[in-house]
Amino acid sequence: MGLDLQSIKQMLLAILSVQPQELTCDECMEFLDRYAELELAGKDARKAMPLVHGHLAICRDCRQEYEGLLLAVRALA
Ligand SMILES: [Zn+2]
């Protein structure tokens, strides 16, 4: 596998997407509602709120909270 421009770009993106973001758990929780709304509305929540997505990818606690929230909202709908 050579290091062409495309794979370097992809590598950079991968590094950026797993870097700890400037979002604390408290801040993340504040956005979870809106993030879940976007997701349930079929919108690209990841693109709209990359910081939240990034935090969810690295934080198990918030991920669990988010999944619980999704379940709760779906159960209500
Ligand atoms: Zn967290």
Image (tube, helix red, strand yellow):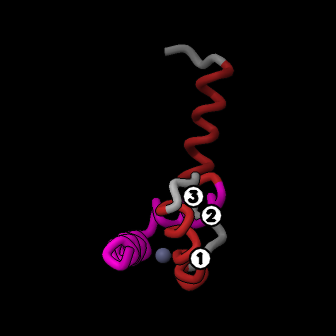
**Residue carrying label 1:** 31
**Mark positioned earlier in the residue sequence (3 or 1):** 1
**Residue carrying label 2:** 51
Q: Residue furthest front?
A: 77
Disc 1 marks which amino acid? Phe
Give the quarter of the image for residue 52. Answer: bottom right
Total numbered circles: 3
Q: Secondary structure at mark 2?
A: helix
Please tell me whether residue 2 is drawn above or below residue 44 in the rendered image.
Answer: above
**Mark positioned earlier in the residue sequence (2 or 3):** 3
**Mark positioned earlier in the residue sequence (2 or 1):** 1
Query: Residue, x 51% and y 54% (percent of image)?
Result: 42
Please tell me whether residue 74 is drawn above or below residue 2 in the rendered image.
Answer: below
Please tell me whether residue 2 is drawn above or below residue 28 in the rendered image.
Answer: above
Q: Main secondary structure of the magenta part?
A: helix
Q: Are marks 2 and 1 in contact (CB under 8 Å)?
A: yes
Disc 2 marks which amino acid? Leu
**Residue 58, image x and y in percent?**
46, 63
Q: For the residue with label 1, is its CB less than 8 Å from the closest atom of ligand 1?
A: no
Give the quarter of the image for residue 19. Answer: bottom right
**Residue 27, image x and y in percent?**
60, 81
Q: Residues within 10 Å of mark 1 (few under 14, many from 20)?
A: some
Q: Secondary structure at mark 1?
A: helix
Q: Looking at the image, which is closer to me, 27 or 40? A: 40
**Residue 72, image x and y in percent?**
35, 78
Q: Secondary structure at mark 3?
A: helix
Q: Is residue 32 left or right of residue 48?
A: left
Q: Looking at the image, which is closer to me, 32 or 63? A: 32
- Magenta stretch bounds: 48-77
